[in-house]
């Protein structure tokens, strides 16, 4: 069987491939410490689970409108209005099965063959994959360690052409934990307004910040109408398996996203949406507790990684990933990731899983317990000292 050109263009998300490999090694009896998957190890807060269960018993088990139930869209609109300091109404919100769908649907509804779309590199691999699916050309924006994993504004401007139709940004970022400064966001907005380019702003980690405050590009003058905000519940509320996200954009863009949605998933499970209302409107104590624990873990893993020969690690300002530079080990990223898995019993991701500019780095997710972090760091140290005398 020959796959279609679209299917052949599709990329993958290496984290799930590495997780599967790690699970297979565990099945064979090998102990593995998991730093590969970007999934909170916390349970979904109890009030949210209760709301979901109640919704099922109250028979919220039928189809919902493709755009999402009004009450959840209203809660999202209120939340975004308060946190981004803009005015949003429920008609400017669409509920999706996770944040990933927003990337996919935005690419399909906005890009054609021959168009170009800019995306961060190293960055979440689905950005590039979604762009390629449409037949458009992905243009990487290098995120460099010397710039604290932000980008060079002058270089960014040189990437813009008459074919540029979309700019994708992610702050706080996966895999680097970097945060785009307000100055960088202003530079993007200046170009977007001048050249009439839309921006997809992935803000899924907006509640997981350790230094400073979150700022959305949609808050800048002239940018709300040309920004698609991507956010969701997976990271903030430890709701990865619930598959619940959303996009906020102007009504014309929402109509485009709805067309893709009705052709792909019809609607998000109604009882899941009811749980989403509780997540946004209920107590937020657990969100802050998780954030504080992530911060403690961040400090622990950064200190430990920087003691390992050949490793040097910038302190991430957000998300829950460490992105150590491993160039002094003398090994390529994929080679070292495989070595640590097979010899050290530690699952990490090669920096190249996030694009060519990730060469020379590994990604460690510290969405795991302090005990596992300490154990994993010791395993990495022992494995590295075998190859670096």
Image (spheres, helix red, strand yellow):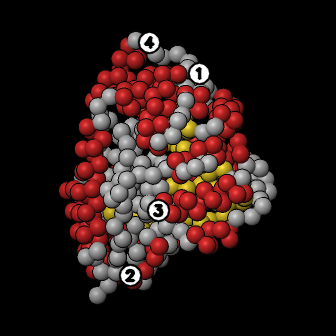
- Which mark sits nearer the N-terminus, 4 or 2? 4
Q: Residue at horizontal 42%, vertical 48%?
A: 206
Tag 1's secondary structure?
loop
- Which mark sits nearer the N-terminus, 1 or 2? 1
Q: Which residue is mark 2?
A: 329
Q: Residue at the top extreme?
A: 58
What is the spatial separation of the Cα atoms under label 3 and label 2, in whole angstroms?
31 Å
Q: Is residue 52 left or right of residue 264?
A: left
Measured as percent of width and height from the top left, residue 228 is found at 59, 44
Q: Which residue is mark 3?
A: 181
- Which mark sits nearer the N-terminus, 3 or 1? 1
What is the spatial separation of the Cα atoms under label 3 and label 1, in whole angstroms?
37 Å
Tag 2's secondary structure?
helix
Residue count near mark 4 (Cα–Cα under 10 Å), binned few <14, some 14–19, many ≥20: few
Q: Nearer the viewer, mark 1 or mark 2?
A: 1
Q: Which residue is mark 4?
A: 59
Could you say which disc has been placed on residue 203 in the image? Answer: none
Q: Nearer the viewer, mark 4 or mark 2?
A: 4
What is the spatial separation of the Cα atoms under label 1 and label 4, in whole angstroms?
16 Å
What is the spatial separation of the Cα atoms under label 3 and label 4, in whole angstroms?
46 Å
Q: Which residue is mark 1?
A: 65
Q: In which quadrant will I find the C terminus? A: bottom left
The reply to whether callout 3 and callout 1 are in contact (CB within 8 Å) is: no
Image quadrant of residue 309?
A: bottom left
What is the spatial separation of the Cα atoms under label 4 and label 2, in whole angstroms?
57 Å
Q: Nearer the viewer, mark 3 or mark 2?
A: 3
Measured as percent of width and height from the top left, residue 292 is found at 25, 50
Q: Residue at the front extreme?
A: 221
What is the spatial separation of the Cα atoms under label 1 and label 2, in whole angstroms?
53 Å
Q: Nearer the viewer, mark 3 or mark 4?
A: 3
């Amino acid at each position: 069987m020959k796959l279609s050109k679209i299917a052949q263009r599709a990329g993958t998300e290496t984290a799930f491939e590495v997780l599967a490999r790690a699970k297979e090694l565990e099945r064979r009896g090998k102990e593995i410490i998991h730093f590969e998957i970007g999934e909170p190890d916390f349970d979904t807060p109890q009030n949210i689970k209760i709301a979901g269960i109640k919704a099922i018993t109250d028979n919220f088990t039928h189809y919902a409108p493709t755009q999402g139930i009004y009450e959840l869209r209203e809660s999202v609109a209120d939340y975004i209005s308060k946190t981004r300091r803009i005015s949003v109404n429920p008609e400017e919100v669409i509920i999706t099965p996770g944040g990933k769908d927003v990337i996919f649907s935005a690419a399909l509804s906005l890009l054609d063959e021959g168009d170009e779309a800019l995306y961060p590199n190293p960055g979440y691999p689905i950005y590039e994959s979604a762009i390629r699916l449409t037949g458009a050309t992905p243009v990487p924006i290098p995120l460099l360690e010397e710039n604290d994993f932000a980008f060079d504004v002058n270089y960014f401007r040189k990437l813009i052409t008459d074919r540029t139709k979309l700019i994708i940004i992610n702050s706080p970022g996966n895999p680097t934990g970097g945060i785009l400064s307000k100055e960088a966001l202003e530079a993007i907005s200046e170009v977007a307004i001048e050249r009439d380019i839309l921006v997809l702003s992935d803000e899924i980690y907006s509640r997981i910040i350790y230094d400073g405050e979150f700022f959305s590009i949609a808050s800048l003058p002239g940018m709300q109408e040309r920004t698609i905000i991507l956010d969701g519940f997976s990271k903030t509320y430890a709701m990865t398996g619930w598959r619940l996200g959303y996009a906020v954009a102007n009504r014309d863009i929402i109509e485009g996203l709805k067309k893709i949605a009705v052709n792909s998933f019809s609607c998000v499970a109604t009882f899941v949406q009811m749980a989403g209302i509780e997540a946004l409107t209920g107590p937020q104590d657990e969100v802050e507790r998780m954030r504080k624990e992530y911060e403690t873990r961040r400090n622990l893993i950064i200190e430990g990684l920087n003691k390992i020969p050949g490793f040097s690690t910038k302190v991430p300002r957000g998300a829950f990933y460490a992105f150590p530079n491993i160039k002094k080990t003398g090994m390529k990223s994929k080679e070292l990731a495989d070595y640590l898995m097979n010899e050290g019993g530690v699952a990490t991701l090669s920096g190249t899983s996030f694009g060519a500019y990730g060469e020379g780095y590994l990604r460690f997710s510290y969405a795991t317990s302090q005990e596992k972090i300490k154990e994993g760091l010791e395993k990495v140290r022992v494995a590295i000292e075998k190859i670096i005398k």
